[in-house]
Image (cartoon, rainbow, N blue to C red):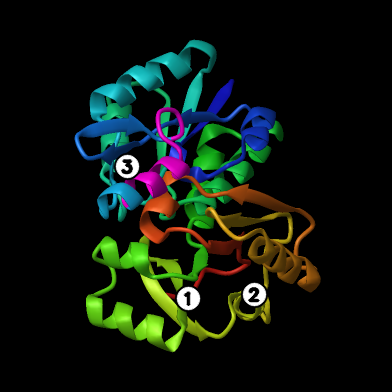
Amino acid sequence: MKIAIAVDSTCDLSPEIIEENHIKIVPLYVNLGEKSLKDGIEIVPSDIFEFVKETGELPKTSAVPIGEFLDVFEEFKKDADAIIYFSISSGFSSSYQNAVVAAQEMENVYVVDTKNLSTGEGLLVLKACKMVKDGASVEEIVREMNVLSEKVDASFVIENLDFLHKGGRCNALAHLGANLLGIKPCIEVLNGKMSLGKKYRGKFASILEKYVADKLTNVEVDDEFAFFTYSESDPDYVKAGIEAVKKLGKFKNLYITKAGCTITTHCGGNTMGVLFIRKDKKEM
């Protein structure tokens, strides 16, 4: 049985990884005022920064409609016997439920709630691709992905709270206080939703090293691969973050990817994180 692996555009996988693994991408939508644009096709992160600069407002993200999922799945099935579609967390978007409804209208289409976003989704997608190459069945892959989704450790540390504030995820007082005190928060994905983690203070480059150590020290990890994912950022910060991860020597492969429109809309620039799979279920 030929199995197609598909995922929404919020996965933040690089073009090289997508091509090498024959991954199919379904774009979500980003709304700039009255314009509804396909993520990664009709809009890229630089457009978001320009829109915010001009209007002072954030774009809105929106789900893939059921009808569009039906069309997409039908297209994918032209060269596959079965489809496993990985969705951004049901806690972030109705896109998951729309995909489920569409899948129920077709045979051999399976939808996985990644309970994550960005390369938190990408981790599961790459694991699934490896299982396909190893000859696993659809049922085996879906079952394993539902187990691994509970073990994904996804987080980002943010230099500036402006986008979180504009998006209503940080009130004015907290925003002012954080800026005055130089606080840089860590945003974590817990129970399929964003949650505020540890708050850091100091120069951002040194904060990145502390953040990475906090995430990876005394943690049993699946060492096959991890992601270091960042939004539009100062190259020195990116370098510092990557070096901090590599220095700990936890992973055989570290993939470096740039965040797309979803992370950019939520968190803005100079946002970066290490995303990996734990050996045990992540504590909530």
Q: Can residue 135 be seen in this view?
A: no
Please tell me which residue is depicted at 48% across the width and 61% down the height of the picture: 150
Q: Can residue 258 be seen in this view?
A: yes
Question: Which mark sits nearer the N-terminus, 2 or 1?
Answer: 2
Amino acid type of the residue that numbered disc 2 sits on in the rendered structure: Ala
Residue 120: give its label: none
Instruction: Tell me how many marks there are.
Output: 3
Question: Which mark sits nearer the N-terminus, 3 or 1?
Answer: 3
Where residue 248 appears, as percent x and y from the top left, is: 77, 73
Helix, strand or loop status at disc 2 = helix
Q: What residue would you read off at disc 2? A: 205
Where residue 196 appears, as percent x and y from the top left, is: 38, 75
Q: What residue would you read off at disc 3? A: 96
- Nearest to the observer: residue 279 or residue 248: 248
Helix, strand or loop status at disc 1 = loop
Please tell me which residue is depicted at 44% across the width and 78% down the height of the picture: 197
Question: Dot 2: within a 10 Å radius of its alpha carbon, few (fewer than 14), some, or many (20 or more) residues?
Answer: some
Determine which quarter of the picture holds residue 21: top right
Determine which quarter of the picture holds residue 107: top left
- Nearest to the observer: residue 170 or residue 81: 170
Residue 83 versus residue 46 in the image, above or below: above
User: What is the spatial separation of the Cα atoms under label 2 and label 3, in whole angstroms?
Assistant: 36 Å
Amino acid type of the residue that numbered disc 1 sits on in the rendered structure: Glu
Residue 172 versus residue 88 in the image, above or below: below
Magenta stretch: helix, strand or loop mostly: helix
Q: What residue would you read off at disc 1? A: 283
Please tell me which residue is depicted at 51% across the width and 37% down the height of the picture: 139
Determine which quarter of the picture holds residue 141: top right
Which residues are the magenta region?
40-52
